[in-house]
Image (spheres, helix red, strand yellow):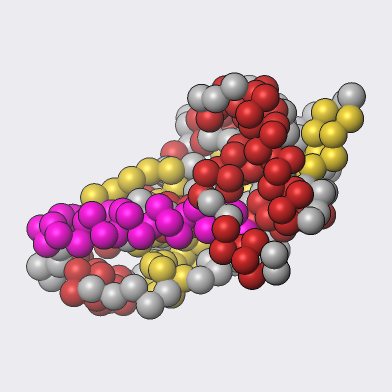
Amino acid sequence: MDGAAVVDDLETRELRYFVAVAEELHFGRAAHRLGIAQPPLSRAIRQLERRLGVQLLDRDRRGVALTGAGGVLLHEARAALDAVAAAAHRTRRAEDLRRPLVLVTKAGASHELLRRLLAAAADTGAAPVEVVLCEVGEQARFLRSGRADVALMHRPVDDLAGFDTEDLCTEGQVALLPSGHPLAARPRLTLADVSDVPGLPIARWPRLDGTYPDGPGPEVRTQSQLAHLVALGKTLLVIPASSRAWQWPDHVAVPVIDAPAITTVLARPAGHHSPALTALTRAAAGLRGAPPAAPAP
């Protein structure tokens, strides 16, 4: 059997099985997540490795780890499964001409800009917009899987590969600090000031592959986790200035003058156009360059 035939024979079931094991790095947890027994899952992964002619996972007494080939397949399998899901979502929704556009955005990010966008869309008679809130880095998966039509995303921190984008605004960043910390009294900071603060390490967000960068800071996945840890004096972070919309009274935001600028964009899957998307994009273009409002310190 040649390589093309092997690829043609790959099934979405096999890819789902492999992604579950690759993300959990534990066959028992992956089997529980999939709702199947562990032995057939192990057999399916071994069969997949034989058919592809590569080792996807290293297995030893300490656990399971991805090989280089496994890392490639994880990336490609996620994209393939997203594409299949997107085809189903978009096909089902194509019949409903009255459905709202689904816009996904990080909870707490670009709040004032989003408010202006929704108001501009309503003023121009664009289709209704349903807002879905997600955590950091999840917008790309919503778009690629077809669960959302459009997203507010941020360059250079978000994954914009394969999307058409409309730049809306560019802003600086601030350090979000516990109110009682000495750095909170400063009028401005630099990245050097916040990079190695004793007892106050920078929080670590997961990378696109789900792993965390090395460092002493706490691993966080949600804004609520982060808000609690900052208020408790356990961490700090550097965020776009407009994201201060969700800061607590126990937080203080201080401008970081040499942090990279962040550009908020309206993103949609490349090549996907509809009258509703076009109308929303035109409404967004009218906001281009408008400064993103942020609450007073």
Task: Quadrant for residue 200, please give it.
Answer: top right
Q: Is residue 283 above or below residue 144?
A: below
- Of residue 73 and residue 255, the one placed in the foreground of this image is 73
- Of residue 261 and residue 152, the one placed in the foreground of this image is 152
Q: Number of numbered discs present?
A: 0
Secondary structure that dominates the magenta span: helix
Residue 291 inside the magenta-drawn segment: no
**Image: magenta residue range:** 76-102
In this view, which residue lies farthest toward the right? Answer: 61
Tell me if 275 is positioned left or right of 105 in this view.
left
Q: Position of residue 246 (x, y in %)?
A: 44, 39
Tell me if 145 is positioned left or right of 203 in this view.
left
- The residue at the point 41 percent across, 68 percent down is 269
- The residue at the point 70 percent across, 69 percent down is 2
Q: Is residue 141 above or below residue 23?
A: below
Task: Quadrant for residue 253, please give it.
Answer: top right
- Of residue 210 and residue 111, the one placed in the foreground of this image is 210
Tell me if 111 is positioned left or right of 231 in this view.
left
Task: Quadrant for residue 164, please give it.
Answer: bottom left
Q: Is residue 3 above or below residue 218?
A: below
**Residue 143 visible to the viewer:** yes
- The residue at the point 79 percent across, 42 percent down is 57
**Residue 229 visible to the viewer:** no
Tell me if 281 is positioned left or right of 163 in this view.
left
Q: Position of residue 94 (x, y in %)?
A: 20, 62
Residue 81 inside the magenta-drawn segment: yes
Q: Position of residue 8 (x, y in %)?
A: 56, 63
- Of residue 142 and residue 184, the one placed in the foreground of this image is 142
Quadrant (top left/top right/bottom left/bottom right) for the N terminus: bottom right
- The residue at the point 53 percent across, 66 percent down is 160
Q: Position of residue 257 (x, y in %)?
A: 66, 61
